[in-house]
Amino acid sequence: MEIIITEAAAKKINARTGGREGYLKLKYDTDGCGCAVNGVVALWFVPELDNTDIAIETNDRTVYLEKSKIIFFDEQMKIDFSEVTNCFQLKSPQQMLNGHMSLIIKEKTD
């Protein structure tokens, strides 16, 4: 799997994470979607990884995905940022996986 992070997306990620320690994760979120095959891809910044997360090296930083959800992603993807919509986008040569993706910053819970 190949993931490219555009310069615009990298700048926005850095600005929004503001020096926090954590991991960038593409999360296939099924909460409120009805079933496991109906979900939406979200961009999360998390303080800890799950033991089922796998690392994908990119041109900018490591991105993590849940191993069981990898089937919902394309082999080549790009994380971009649109100034027009003020949203992150996840796209592949075949499709737009999410054109209005927010960066959700998860805080550590004890």
Image (cartoon, helix red, strand yellow):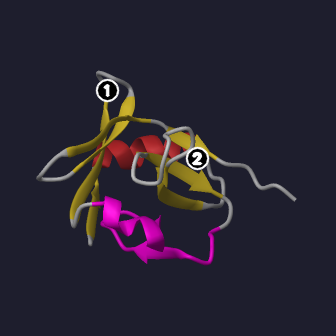
Q: Name the residue rendered at 43%, 65% in the picture.
A: 69
Q: According to the image, label 1 marks what residue?
A: 83
Q: Distance between the residues labelled 2 and 1?
A: 18 Å
Q: In the displayed structure, would residue 32 be above or below residue 72?
A: above
Estimate how packed mark 2 is, as few (under 14), some (14 to 19) or many (20 or more) residues with alpha carbons within 10 Å.
some
Question: Could you tell me which quadrant the C terminus lies in?
Answer: bottom right
Residue found at the far right of this picture: 110
Q: Can you give x and y, in whole percent of width and height, for residue 53 in the image? A: 53, 73
107 relative to 43 in the view: left or right: right
Sequence-first disc among 2 and 1: 2
Q: Which residue is drawn at 50% across and 59% down?
A: 25
Task: Residue 62: tell me if it is visible.
Answer: no
Q: Which type of secondary structure does the marked residue at label 1 adopt?
A: loop
Q: Can residue 10 be seen in this view?
A: yes
Query: Residues in magenta?
Result: 49-73
Closer to the camera in the image, 81 or 25:
25
Q: Residue 97, which numbered label? A: none
Q: How crowded is mark 1: few (under 14 residues within 10 Å), some or many (20 or more)?
A: few
State the image coordinates of residue 39 (x, y, percent, origin top left).
Answer: 43, 46
Q: Position of residue 104 (x, y in %)?
A: 57, 42
> Which residue matches tag 2?
17
Q: Hey, which residue is sitting farthest left in the picture? A: 93
